[in-house]
Image: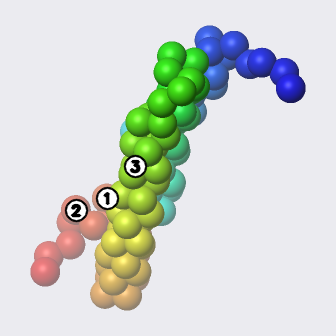
Amino acid sequence: MSHIPLQHVLIFSTALFFIGMFGMFTRRNLITLLMSVELMLNSVNINLAAFNKYLYPQQTGGLFLALFIIIIAAAEAAIAIAIIINLYRSHHSIDVDDATEMKY
């Protein structure tokens, strides 16, 4: 089994985080914003798993924390999708600019 250096994993994770951040700042669609947040959370999970493997290979604290973040991200995605569906049903748009101009 090949050994991947920690630096390569961190570069990959950083790239994923900044792709997610770029999506957050440049897109106006709520679904795309949700996907960007999920991408950033997944990059954090990669960091936790990598540091756990390379710094403390006998301990599992980082892996359990990553699992906890995955559970929280799944709950966040389910609630966000429900809100987006409700917004689309009531206003026929999921654009962020349209959502800020809506009056309830």
Location of residue 57 with respect to 104 vertically, above or below:
above
Residue 22 point in image, percent of width and height: 48, 35
Q: From the image, tell me which residue sits under label 1.
A: 97
Looking at the image, how many numbered discs can be counted on the residues?
Answer: 3
For marks 3 and 1 on the same chain, the one whose residue lies earlier in the sequence: 3
**Who is closer to the viewer here, 25 or 67?**
67
**Who is closer to the viewer here, 41 or 94?**
41
Q: From the image, tell me which residue sits under label 3.
A: 69
Asked if disc 1 and disc 2 are in contact, CB closer than 8 Å, the reply is yes
Marks 3 and 1, how far apart at CA = 30 Å
Look at the numbered disc 3 and give the secondary structure of its residue: helix
Location of residue 23 with respect to 13 vertically, above or below:
below
- Label 1 crowd (10 A; few <14 / some 14-19 / many >=20): few
Left or right, 63 with reference to 5: left
Quadrant in the rendering for residue 41: top left
| Residue type highlighted by circle 1 | Asp
**For the point 27% across and 67% down, which residue is it?**
99
- Label 3 crowd (10 A; few <14 / some 14-19 / many >=20): some
**Who is closer to the viewer here, 86 or 63?**
63
* In this rendering, the label closer to the viewer, 3 or 2: 3
Residue extending farthest left? 104
| Residue type highlighted by circle 2 | Thr
Location of residue 55 with respect to 104 vertically, above or below:
above
Left or right, 97 with reference to 32: left
Q: From the image, tell me which residue sits under label 2.
A: 100
Residue 62 point in image, percent of width and height: 44, 34
Residue 25 point in image, percent of width and height: 40, 39
Asked if disc 3 and disc 1 are in contact, CB closer than 8 Å, the reply is no
Residue extending farthest front? 58
Left or right, 19 with reference to 104: right
Quarter the N terminus occupies: top right
